[in-house]
Image (cartoon, grey):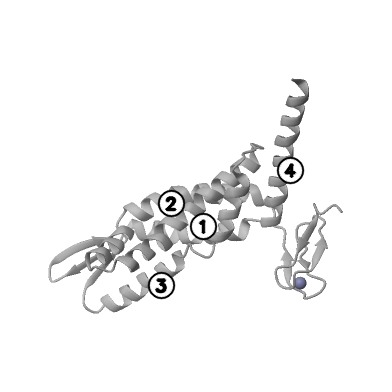
Amino acid sequence: MNTDLLEACPQCDLLMKVEPLTIGTNGHCPRCGCLLFFPRKNSIARTFSYSLTGLILFVPANVLPMVGIKILGVHKDGTLWTGVEALFAEGMWGLAILVFLASIFFPLLKIVLSLLVSACLLFNQPSRQLTRWMRYLKHLDEWAMLEVYTLGIIVACVKLESMAELRFGFGLYAFAGLLIITGMLSSSLDEHLFWRRIDQLQKNIQNQSTNFNQLQ
Ligand SMILES: [Zn+2]
């Protein structure tokens, strides 16, 4: 049996044969109605450009001050790193590591992997690591949580507003841009299209190596 085009519904495990859908149409599971496919326009090119923009924004969002606090004449600037450092200094190691992973490391990894995968697909550059990168990318959605950090910033600003003078820095604007870009990145990535193209590229590598072996 040729299982190349069979896919399983994540809700009810129904195996079905999948044909590529046109842009603007959705594919639902015939048994449980779960939304399975929703093809996006120019998914690969958009994912590539959003991840490149995200990577550029990541630098100022992490390096430049986000919020400056002036209290009793003392002024202090805070970056994304400052929060992690403060938690370390307070002895809250576990929380500091968690904040570092969810707000800095995993979002960066997600952007870099999206850039690598989309670049390989956009420029037809096969790589033996493509399936691994794509698999990691899928799991990173659950860990990269910039939104939670945003909520923390908003809560801190509201609480401090009455007792200190706040000044918003360029790092905060870069962070807001990064947040929007990562959202657009997630919505532009058509997972089924990516897997289908990865499959094609991998088959090309196998065919090339078979032809090479036959020539020898
Ligand atoms: Zn189903």
Residue under label 3, please give it: 151
Q: Position of residue 47 (x, y in %)?
A: 59, 51
Disc on the earlier residue, 3 or 4: 3
Depth order, front residue of 201/149: 201
Residue at mark 2 to residue at mark 1: CA–CA distance: 9 Å
- Which type of secondary structure does the marked residue at label 4 adopt? helix
Residue under label 4, please give it: 200
The type of residue carrying mark 4 is Gln
Residue under label 1, please give it: 181
Q: Position of residue 192 (x, y in %)?
A: 71, 56
Q: Residue 114, relative to residue 176: is it above or below?
A: above
Mark linked to residue 110: none
Disc on the earlier residue, 1 or 4: 1
Looking at mark 3, is its residue's CB closer than 8 Å to ligand 1? no
Q: Residues within 10 Å of mark 2 (few under 14, many from 20)?
A: many
Mark linked to residue 57: 2
Residue at mark 3 to residue at mark 4: CA–CA distance: 41 Å
Task: Tell me if residue 168 can be seen.
Answer: no
- Which type of secondary structure does the marked residue at label 1 adopt? helix
Q: Position of residue 64 (x, y in %)?
A: 31, 54
Do residues under tags 2 and 1 come within 8 Å of each other at their CB atoms? yes
